[in-house]
Amino acid sequence: MYDLTGRRIAIIASDHVEEAEIVGPRDRLREAGATVTVHSRDGEAIQAVEGDVKPTSMVEVDGDFDAIDLDDLAALVVPGGTVNADHLRVDEKAQTLVRKASGAGIPLAVICHGPWLLVSAGLVEGRRLTSWPSLETDIRNAGGDWVDAEVVVDRGLITSRNPDDVPAFVDAIAQAAAAVPVG
């Protein structure tokens, strides 16, 4: 794992986020020294789930989407979970955040159903990415090149398929964040 001391990473999510895809990256990136904050649409704690339907834990958050300062962010992470991803893809603030992060060259890490947000934000065309398999058609229809791989990195966009891919996903995030200058 890379030394991420001094680097800030934000995670955006809503209720019914897949627990392994929010807690795994949050905890492993913190262990590497990053300051990781979690943000919900309304600044309230998030209900995590396993397998989309089984409620697990409540995830404490550090604020709402407006509390994210992109100026010194080393990465922006979007976890999956079908309901979470469906909420985010129609959220104007979430769309604006990923567009601004992408435009600023901030590594954008998206897993599982999370790429629905990228489709809605217009960030898929001409990009190579992966996701949960059922999003393949959505990604291709939006002009993306969908591949079935554990992790895909394309010009600052990091994508993975599912909770089993979290270790490779986190390693790719850490590598990208470590390359971002501190301060």
Image (cartoon, helix red, strand yellow):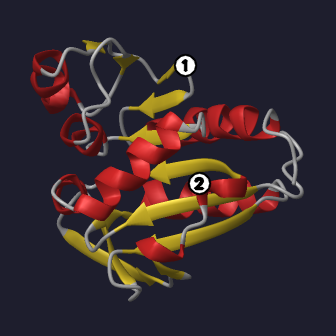
Q: Residue furthest bottom?
A: 44
What separation in Å lies between label 1 and label 2 (alpha carbons)?
20 Å
Quarter location, residue 71:
bottom right
In the image, taking residue 176 as reference, residue 94 lies left or right, namely left
- Which residue is the site of mark 2? 25
Picture layout, residue 177 above or below residue 24: above
Mark 2 nearby-residue class (10 Å; few <14, some 14–19, many ≥20): many
Q: Could one spot residue 58 in this view of the protein? A: yes
Q: Nearer the viewer, residue 51 or 159?
A: 159
Q: Could one spot residue 80 in this view of the protein? A: no
Picture layout, residue 54 above or below residue 6: below
Mark whose residue sits in front, 1 or 2 = 1
- Which quadrant does the N terminus fall into? top right
> Residue 58 at x, y = what percent?
41, 84
> Residue 65 at x, y = what percent?
43, 71
Q: Amino acid at mark 2?
A: Pro
Identified at 10% across, 21% down, the residue is 137
Figure label count: 2
- Which residue is the site of mark 1? 155
Q: Amino acid at mark 1?
A: Arg
